[in-house]
């Protein structure tokens, strides 16, 4: 028996669907028995509409509720909150598979950044600040770079986590997912498996599992970083667990809830746990 998270979601047969969510990202890193914790909490409202040409638009408004960085990055909290305000309103073009294709209000975001940059340059001086602003400028002004940022799980990626396709009880859906900043600034590629575990008239549940991909773009740089952090210990980077689930409304295809936990380690000197959670905001 097979079940379908609609190949063309049923939400696209309706003029407008709106759903509010709370996104939380919790991270705990232990290096040589020193623990650092970080937390992001964001409220998001997603409106999805379409026209007769099957061109789908997602309007996302978000408010950063909580930003708690580790002690090494405490000074960046205020700056990060100001940066988050740039993308409080984002309009995206998506296809029938739920893939993000284009930022429709990219120029508006660029203009907001340029104004913020002028204000920040009066407050933050020096070479380090100038280099930081250059890096942000490249990320925001280049469309594909900013779009990739929106696809990250800590941004809007959880909303369209599972592709809109056929899911069969006896068939796994596999893909390679890249998790940004899983080890310091470096991304990690995961061989991910999605498995249909339950469905009824109202809901579809998909289990999430994964293992470390054999192909890692920054394998040597990750090893060098972890060796430096763990007192030059020779070890292997491990993905200890990658587990979670997501549920969808069967009638609309809209996500109801998602939880994902990622645990990784390097020898005895480095451990990290990252938790993502997306739930409907009923408040």
Image (tube, rainbow, N blue to C red):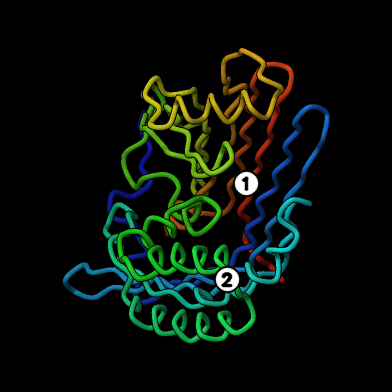
| 267, above or below 202, in the image | above
Labels in figure, total: 2
Of all residues, the one furthest to the left in this rendering is 53
For the point 47% across and 72% down, the residue is: 60
| 258, above or below 15, in the image | above
For the point 59% across and 84% down, the residue is: 122
Task: Name the residue that disc number 2 marks.
Answer: 84
Q: Is residue 241 left or right of residue 200?
A: right
Of all residues, the one furthest to the front in this rendering is 126
* Label at residue 276: 1
- Given residues 185 and 130, the one toward you in this image is 130
Of all residues, the one furthest to the top in this rendering is 234
Please identify the quarter of the rendering in which residue 147 is found: bottom left
Say if residue 193 shows up in the picture. Answer: no
- Given residues 21 and 4, the one toward you in this image is 21
Residue 170 picture location, percent across and down: 38, 22
Q: Is residue 281 left or right of residue 131?
A: right
For the point 45% across and 26% down, the residue is: 219
Quadrant placement of the C terminus: bottom right
Residue count near mark 1 (Cα–Cα under 10 Å), binned few <14, some 14–19, many ≥20: some
Is tag 1's residue or tag 2's residue first in the polypeptide sequence? 2
Residue 42 picture location, percent across and down: 64, 65
* Label at residue 49: none
The secondary element bearing badge 1 is classed as strand
The secondary element bearing badge 2 is classed as helix
Residue 63 picture location, percent across and down: 62, 73
Foreground mark, 1 or 2, reads 2
Say if residue 1 shows up in the picture. Answer: yes
Q: Is residue 143 left or right of residue 240?
A: left
């Amino acid at each position: 028996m097979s079940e379908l998270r609609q190949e063309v979601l049923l939400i696209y047969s309706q003029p407008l669907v709106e759903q509010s969510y709370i996104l939380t990202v919790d991270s705990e890193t232990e290096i040589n028995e020193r623990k650092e914790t970080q937390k992001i909490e964001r409220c998001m409202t997603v409106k999805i509409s379409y026209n007769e040409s099957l061109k789908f638009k997602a309007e996302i408004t978000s408010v950063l509720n909580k930003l708690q960085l580790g002690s090494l990055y405490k000074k960046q909290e205020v700056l990060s909150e100001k940066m988050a305000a740039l993308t409080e309103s984002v309009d995206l073009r998506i296809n029938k598979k739920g893939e993000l294709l284009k930022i429709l209000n990219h120029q508006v975001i660029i203009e907001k950044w340029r104004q913020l940059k002028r204000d920040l340059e009066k407050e933050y001086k020096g070479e380090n600040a100038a280099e930081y602003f250059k890096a942000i400028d490249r990320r925001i002004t280049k469309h594909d770079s900013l779009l990739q940022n929106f696809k990250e799980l800590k941004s809007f990626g959880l909303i369209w986590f599972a592709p809109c396709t056929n899911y069969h009880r006896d068939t796994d859906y596999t893909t390679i997912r890249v998790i940004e900043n899983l080890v310091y600034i470096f991304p990690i590629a995961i061989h991910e498996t999605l498995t249909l575990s339950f469905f009824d008239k109202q809901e579809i549940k998909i289990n999430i599992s994964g293992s470390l991909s054999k192909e890692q773009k920054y394998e040597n740089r990750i090893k060098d970083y972890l060796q430096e952090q763990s007192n030059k210990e020779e070890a292997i980077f491990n993905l200890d667990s990658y587990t979670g689930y997501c549920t969808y409304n069967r009638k609309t295809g809209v996500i109801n809830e998602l939880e994902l936990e990622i645990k990784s380690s390097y020898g005895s000197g480095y451990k990290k746990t990252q938790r993502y959670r997306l739930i409907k905001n009923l408040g």
